[in-house]
Amino acid sequence: MHSEAQRVAALADAQHKAAAFFDRIEQSLIRPGISETQLTRDIAELGRREFGIEQNWHKRIVRAGPNTLAPYDENPPDLTLGEDDILFIDLGPVFEAWEADFGRTYVLGSDPHKLRLRDDVAAAFAAGKKYFQEHPQITGSEFYAYVRQLAERAGWEFGGQLAAHMIGEFPHKSLPVDKAVAWADAGNHTPMRGLDPLGRERHWILEIHFVDRARGIGGFYEELLTVG
C-alpha cells in the first residue's frame, strides 16, 4: 500500500500531466467548425500519441453552446463549435494507475458575457478551495451549499448535482463507498475529511459548473480540492 505522501505526490503528478494535456488540446485542436464528436475523437488520439493515455475512468465530455448547460449524466445531441462560441471539456485520464479529473472552459471569440463566465468558474474554484481549507470539519452538504452561494453571488445558477467527489488510485469506483459519503451534495451530512474504507485519507475533486439558462451557456472548472 502506498504511503499518504506517495498518494499525494502521485495524484499531484497525474493532475500536472492532465494540465499539460489540456494545454495541447487548446493549442492544437479547439477551433470553429469542428463537431463535439470529432473533437472528442481527436482528444483521444492526442492523449494516446503524446501522453500515453489508454484508460479514462469516466466518459470524455466535450460540450459547446447550449450543451454546456447539461450536467454530467446527460448526453445531449452533437453540436459544432461556432465562431463566437463557448465550450468546456471534462476528462478523467489515468496516468500510471492514478486518476486525474480535470475540466476547463474555453471561449472562441470575444463575447464579454462568455469570457466573464469562463473567468468566474476559475475564481469560484479558488474560493471554494480556500473555504474548504479554512473549515476542517465541513460536511459535504455544507460545502455544496457554499459552492451554490458562489454561483449566486456571481450572478449565475449552479448547474451541478454535486460540488465534489472522491478520487484516488484507479479504479477508485471499486471502493466499497456509499455515494452518500463519496459525493459532496445536499444529502451528505458527514465530514468530508477522514479515512476511506481502506484506512487512507479521502481525496476530493471540486467541480464548478455555473450556467446562464436565459442565454443558454454554461462554464465548468474542475481539479483536485485536497492536493496542492
Image: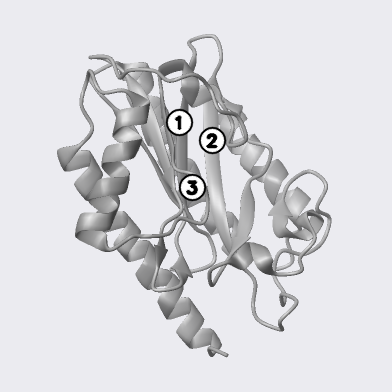
Q: Residues within 10 Å of mark 3 (few under 14, many from 20)?
A: many
Q: Which is nearer the N-term, disc 2 or disc 1?
A: 2
Name the amino acid type tagged 2: His
Name the amino acid type tagged 1: Gly
* Marks 2 & 1, CB-CB < 8 Å contact: yes
Q: Quick check: 136 left or right of 90?
A: right
Which residue is rendered at x = 71% and y = 64% of the image? Answer: 192
- Camera-nearest residue between 72 and 9: 72
What's the distance in space between the residues labelled 2 and 1, CA to CA?
6 Å
Measured as percent of width and height from the top left, residue 6 is found at 46, 85
Measured as percent of width and height from the top left, residue 193 is found at 69, 70
What's the distance in space between the residues labelled 3 and 1, CA to CA?
12 Å
What's the distance in space between the residues labelled 2 and 3, CA to CA?
10 Å
Q: Secondary structure at mark 1?
A: strand
Measured as percent of width and height from the top left, residue 87 is found at 37, 28
Q: Where the N terminus falls, by quadrant? A: bottom right
Q: Which is nearer the N-term, disc 2 or disc 3?
A: 3
Q: Residues within 10 Å of mark 2 (few under 14, many from 20)?
A: many
Q: Secondary structure at mark 3?
A: helix
Looking at this rendering, what residue extends furthest in the top direction?
214
Mark 2 vs mark 3: in front: 2
- Camera-nearest residue between 8 and 131: 8
User: What is the number of the mark on residue 37?
Assistant: none
Which residue is rendered at x = 23% and y = 14% of the image? Answer: 83
For label 3, the residue is: 125
For label 1, the residue is: 219
For label 2, the residue is: 209
